Image: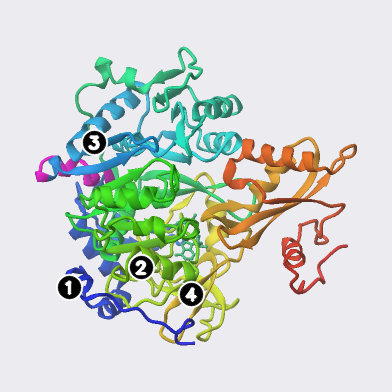
Amino acid sequence: MANLHGEVYYPPEEVVARAHVQDWEKLLEEAAADPVAFWEARAKELVDWFEPWERAFDDSNAPFYKWFIGAKTNIVHNALDRHITTWRRNKLAYIWEGEDGTRRTMSYYRLWREVNRFAAILKSMGVEKGDRVTIYMGRLPELPIAMLATAKIGAIHSVVYGGFSVEALAERIEDAQSRVLITADGGFMRGKIVPLKEIADEAVRRSPVVEHMVVVRRTGHEVNMEVGRDYWYHELCQLPVANGTVETEVMDAEDPLFILYTSGTTGKPKGVLHTHGGYQVGIATTLKYAFDLKDEDRWWCAADPGWITGHSYIVYGPLILGATSFIYEGAPNYPYPDRWWRMIEEYGITILYTAPTAIRGLMRFGNAWVNRHDLSSLRLLGTVGEPINPEAWRWYYEVVGKERCPIIDTWWQTETGHFMITPLPVTPLKPGSATKPFPGILAEVVDEEGNPVEPGVEGNLVIKHAWPGMLRTIYGDPERYKEQYWSKYAKQGYYLTGDSARKDEDGYFWIIGRVDDVIKVAGYRLGTAEIESALVSHPAVSEAAAIGVPDELKGNVIHTFVILREGFTPSPELEEELKQHVRHEMGPIAVPAKINFVESLPKTRSGKIMRRVLKARTLGLPEGDLSTLED
Ligand code: PRX
């Protein structure tokens, strides 16, 4: 059990030689002895503050923990403003390639100018400190620009992933009460146009709180522009109001920076709230230590800025460290399966950070697509989002990394803000294990009572001590925050991750997966309740249940069970119509792989659907305890 797969991979000498942290075990020990002191030292080392803190950590109102109490800061000062007075003003912040081959580069100075312009535009629309701005776009440089502009003036951004559709967007606008929506005419994906503006128009009809829409032109196809509400970004930029600079708002360390909606066990998506102070310390430290980011690197985090991975490691983290990032707009296999490998060669990418599902997808096309490119610029590889199966790990390591590049398997969540369990470049690796908690993070695998389990035994993954980048609450619903994350182990004060895991005899963590009603499809996080409510909003559906079923490529796919209303009969056409309906309401990522028409659903006496039973039946597994089953 010391090593589930019988292999340990040691880092190559040249990686060790340049690694920021040399003695991993020692640092783990030191930081665990006093996590607050560890983070406080990083806060002094890696970011600037307008005014220092009185205390680094406050747990007097647990679980509403606070970090760097009394300190004044703004993450945009650290990500942008401070670089403009140094040699970095001329360094590239972003290199961007569109799916259609368009290229753009942006120096720190240029990015700073753009952010000032966008900030001036937002101010002219009446956006003030604390206001929410929703951003719904493809992977364009204007996405980070819009986020930074919002944060610069002290407003709160809520980015909605561009792959979501009408109802998902409408719900998020409504919950955040955003008066301004920033979007684009469309985006390119697999050679087709994603009609973002059209979706935004329909969402705003459902959530009419939006007063202004700023539209970035990307595809150039014709879109509806409502006079007095919708404005082209490029036209606004020509107005006198967009000139000059905008003061970066002085924020309290605990002031909100953004809301990011994610799926939970029940009901509507949760607005996970992150703040300016602790978050910037957490992301800068983890990125520097785990990926050893240096000035000469070209960092490519292939996630979408619309997810936490993009927020922390495309936008804020790399900019705080003054790094150069690459962003690619489109699909990995468009127009050919070597698109990624061509760009790594072309741009000299040194670190690639992506998801197991993307690795498995590219692996399917065979090695020849990889081997026709010179990937010798790479020195580190990373993964995130779901457990990586050892087969994909080995392919990534051998075929992409040529056995020279350690694989940094980072376990974390929207809620945690930054990496929580991850190797550093010097860590001995075991394929499929995210290794050990990051320095200053105390994680454990516990039983139902909160006692640590024996090595090799499955249990709940918990975090034992607060950390700087943690979520502070669920926007507008502090009770749900307490209930969801802190109630199960309230006595011990542990944070419940919702994941199950095992630890081996070397103390390495092996993440097994979600134990709640969250389904990870191709690394995307979806709630069964969201999919079910999208189905039930169709006139033919009376009740629905969704489960995750293991899938070789996507990790999981969605299977649903649907009871039809009187007067509707099951048919392949209706199945297709329901899938299209889910696509229209939620987006392509939520479309069920299979819809089963059923007469009844297994329920508890109190009427709760027992998805566990559906899952066991689908997979042909034992159904477990059925004593609470009504019928
Ligand atoms: O189940 C874990 C899985 O992704 C969940 C968090 O999803 P989300 O909030 O969308 O954030 C994803 C990007 C940080 C976790 O509860 N997960 C994330 N990383 C890993 C992982 N599972 C196994 N190994 C990982 N490296």
* Residue corresponding to mark 1: 17
Answer with mark 4 or mark 2, whichever residue precedes in sequence: 2
Which residue is depicted at the point 20% across and 34% down? 110
- The local crowd at label 3, few if under 14, some if 14 to 19, many if 20 or more residues have their Cα within 10 Å, is many
Judge whether 259 appears above or below 210 on screen. below
Q: Nearer the viewer, mark 1 or mark 3?
A: 1
Which comes before the other along the chain, label 4 or label 1? 1
Q: Is residue 38 above or below residue 384?
A: below
Q: Secondary structure at mark 2?
A: strand
The answer to whether mark 1 and mark 3 are in CB contact below 8 A is no
* Amino acid on which the number 4 mark rests in the picture: Trp
Whichever of callouts 4 and 3 sits on the residue coming sooner in the sequence is: 3
Label located before the other in sequence (1 or 2): 1
Instruction: Kindly identify which numbered label has been placed on residue 407.
Output: 2
The count of marks equals: 4
In space, the residues marked 4 and 3 are separated at their CA atoms by: 40 Å
Q: Look at the image and give the residue range highlighted in magenta.
A: 75-87
Magenta: predominant secondary structure element?
helix
Q: Which mark sits nearer the N-terminus, 1 or 3?
A: 1
What is the x, y in percent for residue 492? 50, 73
Q: Is residue 446 left or right of residue 284?
A: right
Give the numbered dot on residue 111.
3
Amino acid, disc 2: Ile
Real-space Cα separation, disc 1 to disc 3, in angstroms:
33 Å
In the rendered image, is residue 193 in sight?
Answer: yes
Q: Amino acid at mark 3?
A: Leu
**Distance from the alpha carbon under mark 4 to that under mark 2:** 15 Å
Dot 3: element: helix
The label on residue 617 is none
